[in-house]
Image: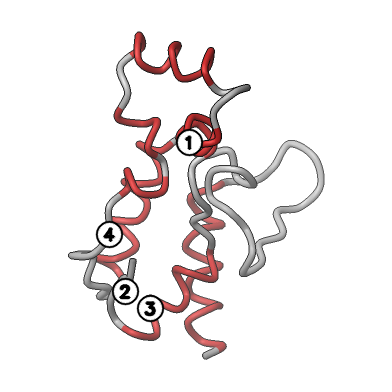
Amino acid sequence: MADAWKRLDAFVAADAGKPLVGRLELTRDTDLYHDLDMEPDHIETLVRRWAEKFGVDLSAFDIHYYYPSAKLGIGAFLATVVESPLSPSAREMLGGRSLTLGMMEEAMERGRWEA
């Protein structure tokens, strides 16, 4: 649905602002954390505003599934950093999982977030 993409693109572009160099190019593969450098707290706020604006049910959405390190205290975070060279689960905790604009577009079309 091209209309959903256009509305999502405009919504995210308004939040992301203008880059220092060049122009902001959003695609369905754009990841909010890795590509747009948004922090998990900002992402959660953005997703909740987006869901309200576009009528998306977020009952299945959990920010900590995508960014598990966001719930760590400083001590646990540092321990995970030290552990990360040896532990795939520690690396996954620090790197998180992708949350892309394509996933958001699909949720807009369905009317609900699916984990």
Q: What's the amino acid at mark 1?
A: Ser
Q: Which mark is residue 54?
A: 2
Q: What's the amino acid at mark 4?
A: Phe
Residue that sits furthest to the left in the current view: 59
How far apart marks 4 and 3 lie (CA) works out to 13 Å
Decide which of tag 4 and tag 3 comes sooner along the chain: 4
Q: Which mark is in front, 3 or 2?
A: 3
Confirm or deny contact between disc 1 and disc 4 (CB under 8 A).
no
Decide which of tag 3 and tag 2 comes sooner along the chain: 2
Residue 53, compared with residue 15, is above or below; it is below
Residue that sits furthest to the front in the current view: 86
- Where residue 50 appears, as percent x and y from the top left, is 34, 62
Q: Which residue is mark 3?
A: 108
Decide which of tag 1 and tag 4 comes sooner along the chain: 4
Mark 3 element type: helix
How far apart marks 3 and 1 lie (CA) works out to 31 Å
Q: Which residue is mark 1?
A: 89
**Residue 63 placement, left or right of 5:** left
Confirm or deny contact between disc 3 and disc 1 (CB under 8 A).
no
Q: Which mark is in front, 1 or 4?
A: 1
- Where residue 99 appears, as percent x and y from the top left, is 49, 56
- Which residue occupies the foreground of this view, 39 or 53? 39
Q: Which residue is mark 4?
A: 61
